[in-house]
Each structure stands twice: as structure tokens, then as C-alpha cells.
């Protein structure tokens, strides 16, 4: 940038030197980017390739080598027939468990967050800011603090070792985040809009439906993506409060990779890892903009 | 019942009653979340705190033993290793991911082609769980199948790379994987920061003949200094809560060399049935988070007030 400004005042020779320097700088920039991109992509590439390689070939040539075989069986096995801890049904049940947990928990926590955010920004009352601050504390508390209380509560509700128990945990935990996201977004909607609507006789729900909701899609997408990936990828509560067939996919993956007997079935494990990684990866690829927005908002606020 | 109410409400105007109900709606809707958050934040913390002061073992019992559990926690060699690991990991993890993240952000900031593609590549590890990352990297670190095997296969037969299976170096395997996962996050925040800097400042420096390097060092980076702090604070929080990554990557091993506080809590509570000491360890984790976050939040509030004060 600085170079172009100076070019005009320099003679031809100096311009050539500057051009060469510019070329070298670009070379270094792209060179570094390519190196880092390789470091980031190679682990993914290794897993993808190995999920299609023959197990014997992996054992012979190692994990990181060019494939000399191509087969799809590992995916089928990982999905429906591989044995984890005595049951031979692959990951499908755990995949459904994760879906059954993630979708309701995401939906409920997002709806509650939107309502809370709406109230805490547009229907403030004395002390509402202080209450908001208290809710925020939930974002920072390590999950380990809540393990014992949750164990007690889930036990008493009869929700131990069930997807519903995990939904409850993720909803309560998620409220802090979703409220934070929505509240900070709704604050930027002008209060005059709400006042005008109230003068026209619109009430709490009508204002939400007619004014707030139509303006909400960006923040709702951010919140849903954030919650979905977070809950899908969660491990601690899954491994503590469920076992065997009830486990979400993260916990099942750990069980699967730990259960290797003598020959490690890298082909099946690679496919299983990809099955576990695919939903959040797809969301990231298609909603990347919103994903990043959630990340930076969640971080800076 | 409905008849009884119909008559008076027909006489007195309906509005005050409805209005009063109307003004209670927000509180009614907010109420359950407030109660849930209050329980989650205060009751749960108080509960765990109390267990940490009790003589519970396999199940919660409420005989008060004061700070005994904390004393035995800090006398435990494994907890001390966990704590040392946390410091070592936090330091390298934060500095490493911020350095790589800043480098990537500056590279991408040079008007490169295909910016979106580069960003997508560097950020995708954040979408994937620590379990997936840890599992895959544990394979790469595996000496008989992973990186070491590959390099030996190329002909360098004495090459040795067995980080994760050496108790002295396994923690660095965790660090490298952590940096790999988190650099993209730092990059995204730095890039957002660099883009938000007033372009007039940059132009003024360019007119003064400052080199690109100097502009970054003297203008851009000082302007985004608060972002450095924000990234560091978030990363420290992640570091303190590190659990999944280690569980999938090394399972705390070899031996107990990569134990972390979160792993220790899990082991004591659910593997060894020593929930009181486990609770004490969980409280120490909370204390660590508070030590980082409280000063930071005060500083943020103070800075906002100051900015507001200056108009």
C-alpha cells in the first residue's frame, strides 16, 4: 500500500526494485498462508482418506499415506454394525441421541433467550440490569461446579441416564448465553418504535410478534448455530450422566476409540469420527458468517 | 364463578385490571428463567461449596469438616501436577494461539485473494468438538501409525516423534493440539479488530512514509490492544475448563502426566467416590476463573464509564 503511493515519485529503476520487492512480499504472504492451510487441513484430510482405505493397508503403510484402496464398508460399519462395549449397532443410536438432545435443547433455549432478551431490553424494570448481570454469571461457571447438584436433581426427577436429563441441563445452562445474545441485539432496536406501538394499544405479545420477531432473524440464526454446535459437541455432561445406548455421540466416540482390542480399526473409527463431526461442520460451512458473528459477539461482550 | 366476575367487571372499567395484568406479563415470562439462573448460579455453587466442606465420600453427607478437603487436595501430588499442567498449558496455549492467530490475521489483512476461503480453513477446527480433534491428533501422535511412522517411511528411519507417549513431553502434545484448535478464534477476533480501526489513522501514517511493518507496530496493534486482553481472558477460561481435549487425546496419561484440574474433579467424583475432595477441586477451578474474570470485568466497566464520561 505504501509502495504504490511512493512509486510515482521514483525513477524507473527504483520502481522496478519496488515491484520486485512487492512480488517477493506477496510470495511470502501466500507461501505462509499455504503452509498454515496445510497444517489445518491435513488432519481432516487424513481422517477422510482413512475412512475409505482398507484396514490392512492402513496397518501396513500408516495413517498418513496416499490411499491405495477404496472401499465404503467402513462407513456402513461405523453407522450400523460396529461393536462398542458389547452392543453391535454402530453409532446410529448415539447419533439419534445427539439429535434428540440437541434439537429440542437448542429450540427451547433460543425461544427463552429471545423472550428474556426482549424483556431485559424493552420492558426494563427496577433492578432488571442487576438481574441480567446475575444471569450472565452463568456463562462463566465451570460445568464441574454443577455436576453434583445435577446428579442429585436428575436422580430425583428420574432423568438419570436419559436424553431428557441432558436437555434440561443444556436448556438451563444455555439460557445465560441465549439471553446475552438476544438482549444485546434487541438493545439496538430503537425504543421509539416500541413506544409508538404501545400508544397504538399494542401489548407485550403483539409488539414481540409484530415488531421484534420480524427484525430478529439474524440474531436467532446466530443463537441457534451457537447453541446447536455447542450442545452437539458437549462431552462432560454426556459422559457423566448417560451410559451405553443412551450416550450422545461425543461420549460414544470416546468409548469407541478406547475399545480398540489388538488391531485398531482406523477405517471404522475415521468414519465414526466424521459422522460425529459432520453436523456442526455442515452448519459451519453453510452458516459460516453467522457462526463467526456468534463467536466474536460471545467473546467481546 | 364466571358469572360473579362478569358483573363487577362490567361496572368498573376493565382497563386498570387488564393493564395491571399486562404490566405483570414481562415479569411472569422472565420469572422461570430468573429462578433457574439463580438456582444454577448461586444454589449450585453454594451446594458444591458445602459438599467441599463436608465429610461426604461416595454420597453427599453433611458433617462439617472445615477445610480438611482443601488441605488434602493441596497435599495430593496428582492435584499439584494438574495445577502445574494448567499453568504450563495456559501460558503456551495463550501465547501460541495468539501469536499464530495474529500472524494469520495480518496475512489475511494484506488484501489477499480468496479471503473467505482462507478464513474458512483456519476457523473450521472451532466448529468441531474437542473430542473429534483430540481423537484425530492422538492418532497422529501415535508413534507406530502417525507422524513418526510417516517420516520413517520416507527413509529417515531414526526419526523420533513420540510426544504423547512420553510422560515428560505429553503436555506439549496437548499444547500443540490446543493451539491448532484455537488459533483461528484469535485470528477472527484480531481480524475484526484490524478492520474496525479508523482508516484515516492508517492513511496519515502512510503519508508520513511509514512502512507497513511500522504501521502495524505503531498504529494498528496498539489500537487493538484491548482485543489482545479479551482474547487472553477467554483463552485462560478455556484453559481452566480443559477437559474434553485431554480426555480424548491422552486420557490424562501417560501415567498421570497430563492430568488437568477438570480431569481430577471428574475422577474423584465419579471414579473414586471422593466427592468432597472433588467438590473442593471444582471450587478451586471456580476460584481460578474468578481470579481472572473479576479484575477484567471491573476494568471493562471502568473503561466504559471513562469513555462515557469523556462523551
Image (cartoon, helix red, strand yellow):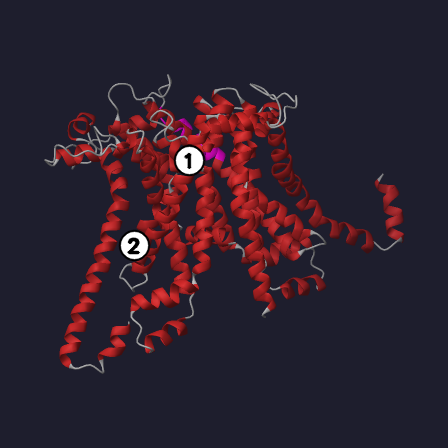
Q: Residue at x 39, y 64 (%)?
A: B195
Pointer 2: what residue? B118
- Reading the image, the residue beneath label 1 is B84
The kind of secondary structure element at disc 1 is helix
Residue A196 horizontal/vertical position (percent)? 67, 65
Q: Magenta segment range?
A: A90-101
N-terminal label among 2 and 1: 1
Q: Say left or right for A116 vs A56.
A: right
Mark yes or no: residue B95 visible. yes
Q: Residue at x 47, y 53 (%)?
A: B230
* Letter of the chain that mark 2 sits on in the rendering: B
Residue B6 place in picture, x, y as percent: 86, 46
Residue A52, magenta (yes or no): no
Q: Chain of mark 1?
A: B
Position in image of residue B55 (x %, y %): 61, 21
Question: Above or below — where is B107 with respect to A134?
Answer: below
Left or right of A202 on screen, residue A184: left
Q: Secondary structure at mark 2?
A: helix
Depth check: give the residue in front, B8 or B225: B225
Between tags 2 and 1, which lies in front?
1
Question: In the image, B217: left or right of A179?
Answer: left
Amino acid at each position: 500500500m505504501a509502495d504504490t503511493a511512493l512509486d510515482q515519485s521514483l525513477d524507473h529503476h527504483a520502481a522496478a526494485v519496488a515491484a520486485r520487492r512487492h512480488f517477493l512480499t506477496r510470495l511470502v504472504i501466500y507461501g505462509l498462508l499455504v503452509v498454515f492451510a496445510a497444517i489445518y487441513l491435513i488432519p481432516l484430510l487424513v481422517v477422510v482418506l482413512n475412512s475409505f482405505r482398507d484396514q490392512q493397508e492402513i496397518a501396513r503403510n500408516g495413517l498418513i499415506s496416499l490411499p491405495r484402496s477404496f472401499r465404503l464398508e467402513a462407513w456402513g460399519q461405523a453407522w450400523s454394525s460396529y461393536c462398542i462395549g458389547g452392543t453391535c449397532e454402530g453409532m446410529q443410536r448415539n447419533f439419534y441421541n445427539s439429535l434428540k438432545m440437541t434439537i429440542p435443547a437448542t429450540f427451547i433455549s433460543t425461544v427463552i433467550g429471545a423472550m428474556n432478551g426482549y424483556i431485559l431490553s424493552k420492558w426494563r424494570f427496577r433492578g432488571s440490569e442487576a438481574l441480567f448481570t446475575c444471569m450472565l454469571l452463568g456463562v462463566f461457571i465451570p460445568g464441574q461446579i454443577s455436576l453434583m447438584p445435577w446428579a442429585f436433581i436428575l436422580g430425583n426427577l428420574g432423568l438419570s441416564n436419559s436424553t431428557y436429563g441432558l436437555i434440561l441441563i443444556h436448556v438451563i445452562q444455555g439460557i445465560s448465553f441465549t439471553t446475552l445474545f438476544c438482549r444485546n441485539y434487541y438493545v439496538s432496536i430503537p425504543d421509539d418504535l416500541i413506544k409508538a406501538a404501545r400508544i397504538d394499544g399494542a401489548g407485550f405479545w403483539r409488539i414481540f410478534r409484530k415488531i421484534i420477531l420480524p427484525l430478529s432473524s439474524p440474531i436467532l440464526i446466530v443463537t441457534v448455530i451457537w447453541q446447536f454446535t455447542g450442545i452437539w459437541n458437549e462431552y462432560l455432561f454426556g459422559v457423566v450422566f448417560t451410559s451405553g445406548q443412551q450416550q450422545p455421540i461425543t461420549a460414544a466416540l470416546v468409548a469407541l476409540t478406547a475399545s480398540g482390542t489388538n488391531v485398531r480399526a482406523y477405517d471404522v473409527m475415521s468414519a465414526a469420527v466424521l459422522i460425529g463431526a459432520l453436523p456442526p461442520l455442515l452448519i459451519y460451512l453453510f452458516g459460516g458468517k453467522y457462526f463467526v458473528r456468534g463467536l466474536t459477539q460471545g467473546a467481546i461482550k | 364463578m364466571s358469572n360473579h366476575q362478569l358483573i363487577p367487571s362490567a361496572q368498573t372499567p376493565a382497563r386498570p385490571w387488564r393493564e395491571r395484568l399486562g404490566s405483570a406479563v414481562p415479569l411472569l415470562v422472565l420469572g422461570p428463567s430468573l429462578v433457574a439462573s439463580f438456582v444454577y448460579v448461586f444454589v449450585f455453587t453454594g451446594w458444591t461449596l458445602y459438599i467441599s466442606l463436608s465429610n461426604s465420600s461416595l454420597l453427599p453427607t453433611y458433617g462439617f469438616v472445615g477445610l480438611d478437603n482443601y488441605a488434602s487436595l493441596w497435599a495430593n501430588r496428582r492435584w499439584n501436577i494438574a495445577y502445574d499442567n494448567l499453568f504450563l498449558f495456559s501460558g503456551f496455549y495463550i501465547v501460541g494461539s495468539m501469536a499464530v492467530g495474529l500472524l494469520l490475521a495480518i496475512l489475511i489483512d494484506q488484501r489477499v485473494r480468496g479471503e473467505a476461503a482462507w478464513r474458512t480453513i483456519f476457523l473450521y477446527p472451532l466448529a468441531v468438538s474437542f473430542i473429534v480433534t483430540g481423537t484425530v491428533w492422538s492418532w497422529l501422535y501415535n508413534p507406530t501409525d502417525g507422524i513418526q511412522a510417516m517420516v520413517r517411511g520416507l527413509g529417515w528411519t531414526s526419526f523420533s516423534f513420540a510426544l504423547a507417549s512420553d510422560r515428560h513431553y505429553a503436555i506439549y502434545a496437548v499444547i500443540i493440539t490446543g493451539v491448532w484448535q484455537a488459533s483461528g478464534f484469535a485470528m477472527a477476533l484480531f481480524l475484526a479488530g484490524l478492520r474496525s480501526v479508523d482508516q484515516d489513522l492508517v492513511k496519515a501514517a502512510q503519508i508520513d512514509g511509514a512502512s507497513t511493518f511500522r504501521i502495524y507496530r505503531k498504529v494498528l496493534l496498539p489500537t487493538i490492544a484491548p482485543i489482545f486482553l479479551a482474547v487472553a481472558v477467554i483463552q485462560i477460561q478455556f484453559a481452566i475448563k480443559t477437559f474434553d481435549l485431554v480426555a480424548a487425546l491422552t486420557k490424562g496419561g501417560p501415567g498421570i502426566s497430563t492430568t488437568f484440574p477438570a480431569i481430577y474433579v471428574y475422577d474423584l467424583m465419579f471414579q473414586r467416590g471422593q466427592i468432597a475432595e472433588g467438590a473442593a477441586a471444582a471450587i478451586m477451578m471456580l476460584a481460578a476463573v474468578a481470579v481472572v474474570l473479576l479484575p477484567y470485568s471491573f476494568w471493562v466497566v471502568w473503561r466504559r464509564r471513562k469513555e462515557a464520561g469523556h462523551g
